[in-house]
Amino acid sequence: MDATTIRPLASSLNQPRAMRASAPHCIIGLGNPGPQYAETRHNVGFRVIDLLAQRHGFPSPQHMLQAVIGEGEIGGIQVLLVKPMTFMNESGQAVSRICAHFDLSPEELLVIYDDINIDLGMLRLRRAGSSGGHKGMQSVIDYLGTEQIPRLRLGIGRLPPKAEARSFVLSPFDAEEEEIADQLIQRAYAAVECVVAEGMEAAMRQFNG
């Protein structure tokens, strides 16, 4: 989902919160901008956003509020798909600006990001909680001032012995891992669809295994 054109955004999101459907209205994938990071473990959140935009036919996005933002529908629900462009550790800066601009509460978000505390290929949906040491998610929590933020954590493999976390998350998957990672992206895509269509509780029952 690359920014190519500028157009008006989200007329339905200008409605008062009470008039909106009870579904997440902003799906945010965390990652780092730039081709050198595209295939790294840290960028699985971006990959899910790209897949959602492609399969649901989102029009060309625009670059604004320190993010690439696309507007479209998933299952008849109007949503924003967002990739912050502030680099991972300052993700909250872009997220807070988007929330302010579109009058979004933290509960209307779904943040997708990598997790080295989950086995490769596994995922976890949660309504709230700490960052678990993930600096991008911690930035979002710090800027929004709450841990009550729905999130989808994607297992990228546990940190190998003696490995340094930064180097590990900024490394690509090897050939065997990439097949599992691709399956993870596909499953995360399905989980997001389920969250939007049926809500967090239904999605957690189906996808938290």
Image (cartoon, rainbow, N blue to C red):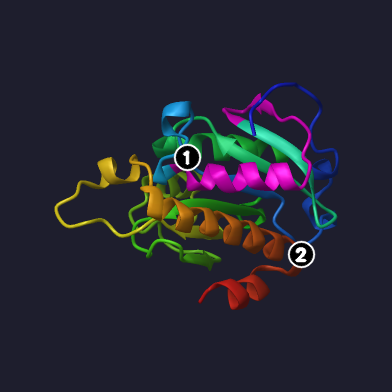
- Quadrant (top left/top right/bottom left/bottom right) for the N terminus: top right
- Say which mark, if any, is on residue 197: 2
Is residue 21 visible in the rendered structure shown here? yes
Q: Which of 106 and 164 is in front in this view?
A: 164
Name above or below for residue 80 compared with residue 159: above
Residue depicted at 59% across the width and 62% down the height: 187
Q: Nearer the viewer, residue 184 or 64?
A: 184
Q: Where are the magenta residues, as a range? A: 43-67
Q: Give residue 165's position: percent from left, percent from top.
A: 26, 47
Task: Report whether 144 appears left or right of 1.
Answer: left
Is residue 99 visible in the rendered structure shown here? no
Residue where numbered disc 1 is placed: 31
Q: What amino acid is at disc 2?
A: Ala
Residue depicted at 39% across the width and 49% down the height: 175
> Rounded to the nearest whole Å, what is the CA distance between mark 1 and mark 2?
25 Å
Q: What amino acid is at disc 1?
A: Gly
